[in-house]
Image (tube, rainbow, N blue to C red):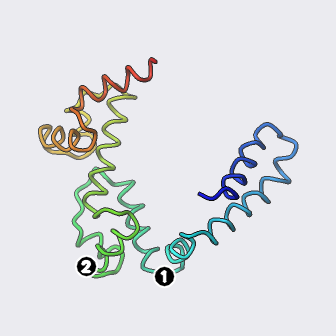
Amino acid sequence: MTTTLLGACQRLVALLDEPDSQAVLAPLIKREIFWRVLISEQGARLRQVVSAGSQGLRVARAIEWLKTHYQEHQSVDELADMAQMSKSTFHHHFRQLTAMSPLQYQKRLRLLEARRLMLGEQFDASSAAYKVGYESPSQFSREYSRLFGTSPKRDIAAQRQQIKG
């Protein structure tokens, strides 16, 4: 985040207080934000990801699929086929985009959703585990503790305490 990009984002947020100016200024500020992101240090990577037919775009489609189907079992071979890549190429590009393997990414999605269910919808740990695709509550608990540093029960209690203030 550069100071100029941050400034543009702040101006866009400040427009929330100026409804009469939003229609005229918001598109211009959004365009500035897009430009600043494209010329940033990560701009080349972003351009590669969104290029039609690029490997990055095909991996991004697989990522979108995982986001909506995180509870389903999906092998890396099937995801690679979906992206029309070899398994090793897919794995390499997936790791480049997300800094984790496809299975780690899916596990993270599942655990975050389970946390949301327990915190926001009052699910118990076992119910949340099954809902997000785990077959074993004990496996879920181990992986949850590894990611969040404590058991589901303790984490949710701490999160609720933090919310209360």
Q: Residue at x 35, y 69 (%)?
A: 94
The CA span between labels 1 and 2 is 18 Å
Q: Between 119 and 158, which is closer to the camera in this rendering?
A: 158
Residue that numbered label 2 is attached to: 88
Q: Residue at x 74, y 63 (%)?
A: 32
Callout 1, which amino acid? Gly
Query: Is the residue marked by circle 2 packed among few (<14), some (14-19), or many (20+) residues within 10 Å?
Result: few
Q: Residue at x 53, y 71 (%)?
A: 46
Where disc 2 sits, the SS reads helix
Using the image, tell me which numbered label, if any, was put on residue 138.
none
Q: Between 88 and 132, which is closer to the camera in this rendering?
A: 88
**24 displayed left or right of 140:** right
Residue that numbered label 1 is attached to: 53
| Residue 57, horizontal then vertical, whole percent | 46, 74
Q: In this picture, is 155 found above or below 96? A: above
| Residue 9, horizontal then vertical, whole percent | 69, 51
Disc 1 or 2, which lies upstream in sequence?
1
**139 displayed left or right of 112:** left
Callout 2, which amino acid? Ser
Snapshot quadrant of residue 149: top left
Q: Residue at x 19, y 32 (%)?
A: 126
| Residue 155, horizontal then vertical, whole percent | 29, 29
Q: In this picture, is 117 found above or below 164? A: below
**38 displayed left or right of 147:** right
Q: In this picture, is 33 found above or below 56? A: above
